Image (cartoon, rainbow, N blue to C red):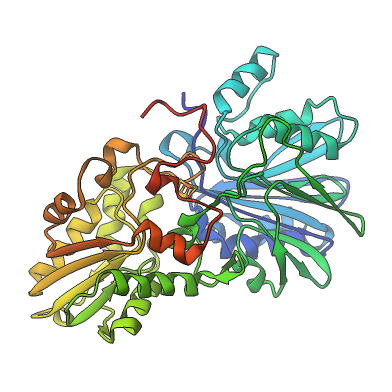
């Protein structure tokens, strides 16, 4: 059994709002791009907890009657979760938020990220009699909280942060408190907002916009923010076991995962991707007739490239918006089907043209090859490809489900070999210096560089 399915997720929480479950629904809807396999909401009126989880997309799971069953206008607080997982973990039992009844009362928890010491912790907890209901790493955190010897939940959370390693952004809900937690490296995003003066927490700020909440700030790496009654407390992880952890926010959030209308690190994602395109123009000036973005991830970078070079931007690929993101489908056969349906080429627009396509990444290379073939068959004279990040050579242990190294095109092939294999006239990746130049320091770049901020104790040797 796979005890540590990686999950790339969206989390949301809101407190002191009469329609909390409905607000959580809208928040999860805005975060749908972060996970499309399952979703859940847990709400409370300060006494009882209500819970609903299901497989599939947010609007299909939370119908009007379900939102009523989540307490309607009687609940004041809710947390929610959108989940993506690997194939082994795609089951309703792993849907979140997870909840437990313990000495601190009922606790619900929603997690974005991936722990890197799941195996030893789970073995230890099981040897002490812990019974797991899921195969998620998230449940380890819930059990550490529930079984804590600490006299307060505040201390139990700090103790738990001492034990777990890796990536975790959390929203936790008790009968009276909404709690936001971010791991000491700050791998995954987590932001705080306010709605009518009341606290809201979300993976991305786009979830604030849909409910007219105001973005206040990001949760700092290693910070615990507790909203209880009308007071807010801030705690900081002690990290006695590690030297001061380096801030290591996931650089791939900027390249691919986050929505362009979200703000991270004080900058909107759109502008960062635009700057990546400008930098690509600097690194790879190409004599071409048109630039064709691969939607959605390549669009902002293509605009930056077009502005910097003056070459016309042509939307030759039209996306069917009702098909999910292919990268985050768990199996290859699901991915293949999705790719075929997802993007359609307007052949007329590329015929007899020298084309530069701009994409956000080449992971396996299979989808890129299909697209290049279609452009060539439509009569393009030349097809060049520019990628708005460096070549992916290493797996991610912090919550992004790249395939293992054997399936990463750039792990075993040079750029020239990949170019030939994809049938391209030229291929260029944004340099690591270019990426760091745009983002600044304090980011994880391990899937490109192999420099892992935290060693995984779960990983099989590469
Ligand atoms: Fe993000 Fe890559 Fe680091 Fe994973 S390894 S956290 S995808 S930058």
Q: Which residue is depicted at the point 48% across and 40% down?
A: 452
Residue 230 locus on image (x, y percent): 92, 60
Q: Which part of the image, by quadrant, shows the C terminus?
A: top left
Please state which of residues 112 and 310 is positioned toward the viewer in this rendering.
310
When the figure is inspected, residue 195 is found, relative to residue 192, above or below; the finding is below
Q: Which residue is depicted at the point 25% across and 46% down?
A: 409
Please state which of residues 450 and 156 is positioned toward the viewer in this rendering.
450
Count of marks placed on residues: 0
| Residue 132 falls in image quadrant | top right
When the figure is inspected, residue 119 is found, relative to residue 109, above or below; the finding is above
Q: Which residue is depicted at the point 12% across and 65% down?
A: 425
Please state which of residues 17 and 113 is positioned toward the viewer in this rendering.
113
When the figure is inspected, residue 362 is found, relative to residue 314, above or below; the finding is above
Residue 421 locus on image (x, y percent): 13, 52
Quick check: can you spot residue 63? no
Q: Is residue 381 left or right of residue 220?
A: left
Residue 238 locus on image (x, y percent): 77, 38
Quick check: can you spot residue 344? yes
| Residue 280 falls in image quadrant | bottom left
Residue 430 locus on image (x, y percent): 33, 62
| Residue 206 falls in image quadrant | bottom right
Q: Is residue 299 left or right of residue 169?
A: left
């Amino acid at each position: 059994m796979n005890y540590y399915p990686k999950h790339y997720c969206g989390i949301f929480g809101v407190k002191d709002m009469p329609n909390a479950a409905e607000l959580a629904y809208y928040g999860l809807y805005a975060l749908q791009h972060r996970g499309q396999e399952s979703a859940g909401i847990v709400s409370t009126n300060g006494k009882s907890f209500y819970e609903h989880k299901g497989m599939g997309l947010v609007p299909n799971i939370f119908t009007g009657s379900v939102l009523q069953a989540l307490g309607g206008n009687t609940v004041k607080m809710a947390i929610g979760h959108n989940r993506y997982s690997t194939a082994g973990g795609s089951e309703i039992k792993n849907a979140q938020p997870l909840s437990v009844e313990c000495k601190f009362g009922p606790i619900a928890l929603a997690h974005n990220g991936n722990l890197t010491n799941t195996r030893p912790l789970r073995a230890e907890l099981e040897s002490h009699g812990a019974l797991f209901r899921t195969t998620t790493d998230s449940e380890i955190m819930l059990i550490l909280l529930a079984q804590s010897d600490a006299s307060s939940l505040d201390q139990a959370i700090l103790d738990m942060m001492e034990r777990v390693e890796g990536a975790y952004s959390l929203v936790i809900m008790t009968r009276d408190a909404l709690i936001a937690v971010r791991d000491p490296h700050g791998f995954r995003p987590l932001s705080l907002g306010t709605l009518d003066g009341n606290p809201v927490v979300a993976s991305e700020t786009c979830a604030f916009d849909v409910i007219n909440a105001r973005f206040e700030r990001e949760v700092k790496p290693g910070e615990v923010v507790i909203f209880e009654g009308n007071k807010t407390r801030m705690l900081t992880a002690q990290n006695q076991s590690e030297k001061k952890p380096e801030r290591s926010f996931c650089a791939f959030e900027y390249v691919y995962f986050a929505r362009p209308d979200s703000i991270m690190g004080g900058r909107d994602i759109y502008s960062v991707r635009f700057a990546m395109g400008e930098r690509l123009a600097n690194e790879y000036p190409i004599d071409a007739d048109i630039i064709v973005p691969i939607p959605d991830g390549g669009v902002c970078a293509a605009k930056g490239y077009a502005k910097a070079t003056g070459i016309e931007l042509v939307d030759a690929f039209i996306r069917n918006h009702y098909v999910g993101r292919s990268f985050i489908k768990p199996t290859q056969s699901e991915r293949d089907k999705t790719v075929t349906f997802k993007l359609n080429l307007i052949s007329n627009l590329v015929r007899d043209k020298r084309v530069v396509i701009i994409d956000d990444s080449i992971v396996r290379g299979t989808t890129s090859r299909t697209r290049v073939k279609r452009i060539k068959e439509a009569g393009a004279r030349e097809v060049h490809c520019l990628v708005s990040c460096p070549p992916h050579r290493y797996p991610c242990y912090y919550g992004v489900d790249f395939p293992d190294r054997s399936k990463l095109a750039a792990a075993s092939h040079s750029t020239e070999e990949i170019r030939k294999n994809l049938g391209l006239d030229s291929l260029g990746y944004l340099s690591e210096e270019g990426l760091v130049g745009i983002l600044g320091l304090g980011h994880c770049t391990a899937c490109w560089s192999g420099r892992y901020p935290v060693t995984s104790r779960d990983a099989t040797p590469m």
